[in-house]
Image (tube, rainbow, N blue to C red):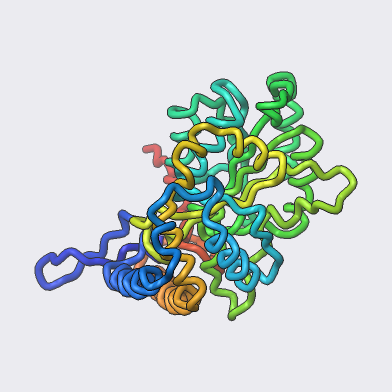
Amino acid sequence: MFSTQADHLESGPERIYSLKAGAPSTRLRQKCAELVQKATLSLHKLEQCPDAFMYGADPGAALFRLELAKFLTEQYADTVNHEDLWVNAGASQGLAFIVSLIFQPGDVVFVEEPSYYIGLKALRDDLGMKVIGVPSDKDGIIVDELEKLMMEHSNELRPPTDKKPYSAMLYCVPTFNNPTGSYLPEERCKKIIKLARKHNALAFCDDVYNLLSYMDDKPPPQRLFAFDDKSDADYKGNVISNASFSKFLAPGLRLGWMEVPERVRRLLKTSAYASSGGCFNHYISCIIAVALQEGLVKDHLLMVRKVFHSQLNALCNALDKYIPGPFTYQRPKGGYFLWVTFPQKSTVTN
């Protein structure tokens, strides 16, 4: 992990940097606090400010979704439709909400190995799903292995119903993976879409790192959601992009978004949990809507990318200089994580 909470703990004459939390540093969180303060003052001057203290529309405030769609369209270099957006209270809440609404305990979920360990724990322990690991390599999940496993477990996939329209789930971090830093090539993305449609599976993408691209100002790799083309003859909607502001603004905001297909939106609109709360984080989303509108979020993201890219280079330089013995790593092109592989410990027999 390199783009982390870079706060340090003093230890004699040396500084020990904690890599425990994957979050912006104290300095970056202070910058976020200044952004939020400025946007809050702007919001409170608006005539419609009292609406920010009401329940709000279930999918999120119209202004927030419109401004977010414009922001993401620019950053992704790919069209994002505001009607596809649904506000969540962070990526973890988005995962729990979707799985509890659309799946049931015992349903099969295919998960790339390695993957985000708390996500796996939530799927297995909290939500009671049957987790099946899928091998990956330097380019992410190996789609041929996924296909074999889907065929092998096809008799365990639940028949779809109106309220539970998917027979299985794929949980993945396709862009700047946690923890390997890899991203799925275009050809693998296309193959996953075909498999998801064939086996009636929902690909749930943890897309919290997509905007943290260090590829010479190029847009990040296309998210898997973009490959599930609505103009295809066999399109049904088999991908959700679950994202968050946690990794480049601040996790304490508890604000994120999902891009969801129409058949999922129809189910979300029937959720008592969603309609009772009236948007999962309405007030903060109204503040961030103003910050997006004023260009504050874009400026902050550009600054954060430079900081994180610098930290990545520093870590790689330190690895090359100070780590003894043979090891390998692939320098990531975005995200938070760098995966180092050491040789297996050999057994010496006397």
| Apparent side of residue 338 relative to residue 37 in the rendered image (left or right) | right
Q: Quick one: 104 or 214, which is closer to the camera?
A: 104
Where residue 143 sits, quadrant-wise, is: top right
Q: Residue furthest left?
A: 12
Q: How many marks?
A: 0
Residue 210: x, y in percent?
Answer: 56, 62
| Residue under the image location 46 percent in, 36 percent down | 276
Q: Quick one: 296 or 9, which is closer to the camera?
A: 296
| Apparent side of residue 152 relative to residue 231 in the rendered image (left or right) | left
Residue 334: x, y in percent?
Answer: 53, 67
| Apparent side of residue 51 relative to residue 226 in the rendered image (left or right) | left
Q: Quick one: 97 or 188, which is closer to the camera?
A: 97
Residue 278: x, y in percent?
Answer: 47, 44
| Residue under the image location 65 percent in, 47 percent down | 260
| Residue under the image location 71 percent in, 26 percent down | 162
Q: Residue furthest front?
A: 47
Residue 275 drawn above or below residue 226: above
Residue 184 drawn above or below residue 267: below
Q: Residue furthest right?
A: 233
Q: Would residue 331 be visible to someone looking at this image? A: no
| Image quadrant in which the C terminus is located | top left
| Image quadrant in which the N terminus is located | bottom left
| Residue under the image location 60 percent in, 38 percent down | 268
| Apparent side of residue 10 relative to residue 285 in the rendered image (left or right) | left
